[in-house]
Image (spheres, rainbow, N blue to C red):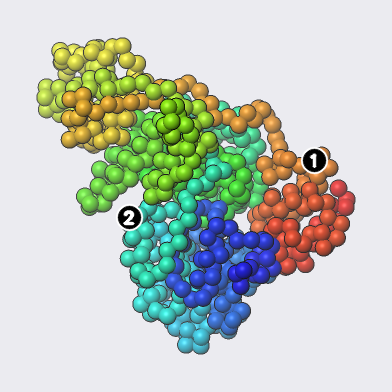
Amino acid sequence: MSPHLPILREVFGYDAFRGPQQDIIDHVAAGGDALVLMPTGGGKSLCYQIPAIARARNGLGVTIVVSPLIALMHDQVGALHEAGVEAAFLNSTLSSEEAFDTERRLMRGEITLLYAAPERVTTAKFLGQLESLRERGLLSLFAIDEAHCVSQWGHDFRPEYRGLAVLHERFAHVPRVALTATADALTRADIVERLQLQDARQFVSSFDRPNIRYAIVEKKDATTQLLRFIEREHTDEAGVVYCQSRKRVEEVAEQLVQAGIRALPYHAGLAPELRQKHQNAFLREDGVVMVATIAFGMGIDKPDVRFVAHLDMPKNIEGYYQETGRAGRDGLASDAWMAYGLQDVVNQRRMIDESPAAEEFKQVMRGKLDALLALAEATDCRRARLLGYFGETYSGQQDSGGGIYMPYCGNCDNCLNPPEVWDGTDAARKLLSTVYRCQQASRSGFGAAHTMDIVRGKLTDKVRQRGHDQLSTFGVGADYSEQQLRAVLRQLIALGALNVRSEDGFNTLELTDGSRPVLRGEQSVLLRESVTAEKTSRSKSKGRTAPTVAAANLGQEAMVRFIHLKAWRAEVAREHNLPAYVIFHDATLAAIAEAAPQSLADLQGISGIGTKKLEAYGEQVLQVCRAS
């Protein structure tokens, strides 16, 4: 048994470690360096919080937690206080008097975990304070959260993280643990190099989130599709909707509100006070849908987000995985839903090509985008594709006939409703031939819409003016719909057989080396049949409003207790200015409601109730249960 299991039980109220937590905690608590990759919801925080508590109890002093987000610091420190742990943060929300008091407590060795942003940690003043703590044997551990931010290859690079190399240079004998939920092999190698973790032990957990159902649909009318998805699957449930632009965020939030959904916008263009107000509402209230740019999300610990939707395609799989991972942190059924179209591909390609970055960086970013395109266009198991990107082989399989076993997860759209596939090779060759002939005839490139008009034989003004109705490929694909040709173009871009280039402010198509095998008939282009409706429903009746997924299986009397417990928790959370889940998770309330406890002894052993919470809230919980 791990010597740290008593802390898990006493402080956090859990009976057993999950996955690799025990090995990580034992290693870090013993003074070892570590790089930890663990999916969102996998319990990363405990991997440094328990070692911090253990080392502090052994007189080794404070753990410094490097965190990029003020909101996350506040909520994690609040949660630790609720569990009876001395924790604090230093950030711009503190008054000078509050900051001075925190620094005084720090230097006295009264704090177990101190959260601070990388900009503060690398200042001369703070480094001087750390030197003083080390000299007195009171500097225990460095925990670098969201470690992918140090890598230029990661999806959320933050230059200020680069300065954290100073921690190893100046405090070589103080152990360090770097943690992230998302990093491919390239990003992982960059983290190791930038943070000088070459001798650190690496713990790489499975990236699989089996409770998340993945679905990617062809974009037609994205907002209408989103509304249908929410109304059918997630009435009155919390979710996040990601859009690429601030304008789009505002538009979608307004449309959801008009449809009777409690939606709030969040983007960097809003006043800081309004952003904070909206974030607090999302964290502290039930059933709020946040419509946001990627400015929102990192470090959001809300456990009961039931869906994450993308109305625009992210830049890469890391970003997609990180963002979808904010759904279902409580381990209960959740959805990752994305609407995706040709324009998304064009926009992402253009942003890469027009960026001022070096060509090496652009090439890597194109490769990452291509991997996401392949995921979106896939006709086989999406989970297997997603895990394969991170170097993990998915073990789930199903006999597809004739003794041929294919990856099968049973919880993505392709596995649940295998798409019909059609051979788009002929259409692909006609499109590529048209791109080639346009370039020959006009010495310039043309966009997707114009190319499709030529192939379909559509005599527009532009086609006539350019003389492209005289091309040999004019009308050769008249039997294909525009929807089919768009799907072929997406697949050709995903295959690398077509490139999108920005030319004088316009997006144009150009052939690549990958065009040749398709043109010669050496490479087939198989595409998923376009569908008009998504068929991944969990058969949830429209308008059903269960109080929470966690309580779905409770009996009538237990459900009454659960509802009363939630109302009590909301009051306590307001008093403490904390999200409700910091007091108790829904799963803990559901377990209490089902147990119908009559004494404090009955509450002991319920997951999520540690010693401090039992002392603080035990009698109140019993009163609520007795009165229900």
- Using the image as rendered, state which of residue 278 and residue 174 is in the foreground: 174
* Residue linked to disc 2: 186
Q: Which residue is mark 1?
A: 555
Quarter of the figure with residue 307: top right
Ranked by sequence position, the earlier of labels 1 and 2 is: 2
> As drawn, is 561 to the left or to the right of 356?
right
Q: Looking at the picture, which amino acid does disc 1 mark?
A: Gly
Quadrant placement of the N terminus: bottom right
Q: Using residue 586 as the reference point, say whether residue 144 is left or right of it.
A: left
Residue nearest the viewer, comparing 446 with 16: 16
The structure residue drawn at horizontal position 71% and vertical position 37%, both measured from the top left corner, is 546
Residue 239 can be seen in this image: no
Q: Are marks 1 and 2 in contact (CB under 8 Å)?
A: no
Residue 482 seen in the figure = yes
Q: Secondary structure at mark 1?
A: loop
Residue projecting furthest to the bottom: 136
Determine whether 177 is above or below 357 in the image: below
- Separation of marks 1 and 2 at Cα, in angstroms: 50 Å
- Mark linked to residue 335: none
Can you give x and y, in whole percent of width and height, for residue 530 in the image? 42, 22
The residue shown at (74%, 51%) is: 591
Quadrant assignment, res 340: top left
- Answer left or right for 347 relative to 77: left
Please rate how many residues cluster around mark 2, counting C-alpha atoms within 10 Å: few if below 14, some from 14 to 19, many from 20: few
Mark 2 residue element: helix
The amino acid on which the numbered mark 2 sits, given as a three-letter code, is: Leu
Asked if residue 214 is positioned above or below residue 268 in the image, the reply reads above
Q: Is residue 313 or residue 432 the one in the foreground?
A: 432
- The percent position of residue 344, horizontal first and vertical second, equals 36, 34
Residue 50, image x, y percentages: 58, 69
Is residue 265 positioned above or below 174 on the image? above
Q: Which residue is depicted at the point 50% across and 50% down?
A: 297
